[in-house]
Each structure stands twice: as structure tokens, then as C-alpha cells.
Image: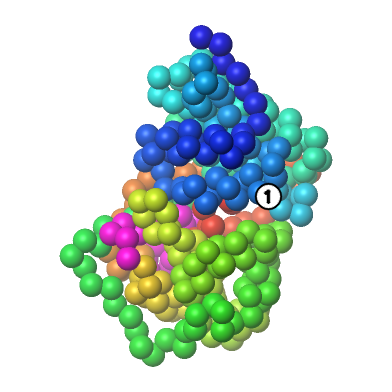
Amino acid sequence: MEIRFRTMTPNDIAGGMRLKTTAGWNQTEADWRRFLEFDADGTFVAEAAGRIVGTVSTIAYEDRIAWIGMMLVDPGFRRRGIGEGLMRMALDHLRFRKISVIGLDATPMGRPLYERLGFVASSSLHRWSLDRCGMASKLSHSIDAHETHEYDLDAICRLDGIAFGADRSRLIRSFVVESPTRVVTCSDSRVPDGSAVLIARQGAVADHLSAWLAPSATGAAKLLDMALARTALPVVIADVPAEHAWAGAVLSARGFRIARDLTRMYLADSAEVAQPVAHAAILGPEFG
């Protein structure tokens, strides 16, 4: 059967959702739309007999750092070179845009492909998961926390930019507009602009604790308790850099357990040296 590779369109979102559901991933239709809205030419599909059998996404920040995600192949079409074909399209696109740093977060299944394409491991991430069925969320009423619309959103975006190494304000704002009460902040004089931040993104199967930025376990715990009180799905996940053991300890104390590991990788010929991850939990493997 002939495999056709092409740019993704809004009409392909249903096919992408089918693949991510089969894989058990957490992304929503809104996430697919973000990729298409941020770069209409940067997300790709593999098609067979009119059916979407593979996907890959790219998103670039400041035309300097790009992230590859949503690498999915239909189980019935694996080992046919679809993943490599999609990755080469993504890399050609980003190189044409002259992006200097290209990264991704690899599952164990995907890592061998990425290594063949020139990616090298930089660090490790732990996917922490909480199944809180029957558990009562606890909120510390001593927290000086506010809904995001009462805060300076520019300051939140600036904090994320400092931690990530590039301006992602358009993406951050899109999450805030979608669910403003799911972004929690608390006063902390040890952080630039005096705040710590956590975005609780609602996914298809789990609430995803994202862009969790705090200077200490105490600040991180305050944000986590607030976020757990404002979310409702039975499962909560967070992707935490392995070197941030203190963040893992905060999660473990609240019943989270490590569900899987990811490897943060960068293309070896990237012009810049990748920065350490400053977030207690990253925005997400698909967004960096």
C-alpha cells in the first residue's frame, strides 16, 4: 500500500486523535489546533488509502528553539519507515527555517530512531502519575494564591521564558485563555517578579501539571496543593526533570508514583548548547 507524506490540515485532526488515543496519550483537539495555528506548515501526516497512519508536530519559539512532538504511527503500519519519513520532513522544515536548536522528549520506543537521525541524550524526565480516585484534594488556606486573571500575565510569560530559554508567551497565553482558573501563582520573593507558577492543563485522560516553576520544595508544594484543589480528573500527571529530586519528593508525598521515563534529546548539530531545564515540571513532551 502506498504511503503518502504531506502537511497536516484541520481535517486531519480526527485522524491524529485516533492515533493518540490508541497510544493512550493525553493531548486534546485543542492541542492539535495549536500546532496548526502556530505554524500551518510545520505538522505532518502519513496517509494510506485516505487514512491517517502517522503524525509528527513541530513548534518553534523565537525562530531559535524548536520542539518536535506527536510522533505517532498506527501499530498496523510500523516498521515501514513511516516514523523516519515523518521525522525527516519535520527536520527539513525546521532547517529551512534555520532554527538553531532542535529538541524532543523521547519515549524508549522512539529513542533508537532519534539517535539514528543524529539526536543525542541531554537529560532524563520522570512521568509522575497520581490516581486520586477516592482521595480528597487538600488545599492549604494559608497559601497567598490568586487566579491568573488577577496577576500580571506578562510576568508569568517572562518567568517561563527565563526558565525555558526562549519566549513562549503566545503558547502560555493560549492555555491561560482556555482555562484561566487552572493557572495558579503564589508570592515568593526568591523568584524573579516575586511569583511562582503552575499551569494545570486539562487533557483527554488526565490533568497535566505543566510549566511548574518554583524555587524550592516549599514553594512547589504550595502550588501543587492549589492546583490539585482546582482540577477534577481522576488522574494527574507531571513530567519532572530527574535532577529535580526535590520536586519528585513533593509529588511522592502526595501519592504520585513514577509511571515511565522520557529522555530529553537535542540534535547534535544544534548551534547552541542546550540549557538545563529549570522547571520543576516541563510544559509537556509535545511543547518542550
Residue 248 shown left or right of residue 105 in the figure: left
Q: Which residues are magenta?
A: 232-250
* Residue in view at x 67 percent, y 55 percent: 275
Visible residue check, residue 287 = yes
Nearest the viewer among 8 and 164 is: 8
Image point 57% across, 67% down: which residue?
Answer: 177
The residue where tag 1 is placed is 38
| Residue 3 quadrant | top right
Question: Is residue 216 in view from this perspective?
Answer: no
Q: Quadrant of residue 8?
A: top right
Residue 96's x, y, as percent? 80, 35
Q: Magenta segment: does it hold 283?
A: no
Against 10, is 151 above or below?
below
Q: Is residue 203 above or below residue 226?
A: above
User: Label 1 is placed on what type of residue?
Assistant: Phe
Residue displayed at 33% across by 80% down: 139
Horizontal and vertical percent for residue 107?
47, 38
Question: In the image, is residue 67 above or below residue 208?
Answer: above
Q: Position of residue 55 (x, y in %)?
A: 55, 32
Q: Residue furthest top?
A: 1
**Furthest residue toward front:** 11
Q: Residue at x 42, y 35 (%)?
A: 18
- 179 sits left or right of 99 in the view: left
**Type of colouring:** rainbow
Horizontal and vertical percent position of residue 282: 53, 57
Q: Is residue 86 left or right of residue 143?
A: right
Q: Residues within 10 Å of mark 1 (few under 14, many from 20)?
A: some
Q: Residue 237 colored magenta? A: yes
Asked whether 59 or 240 is in front, the reply is 59
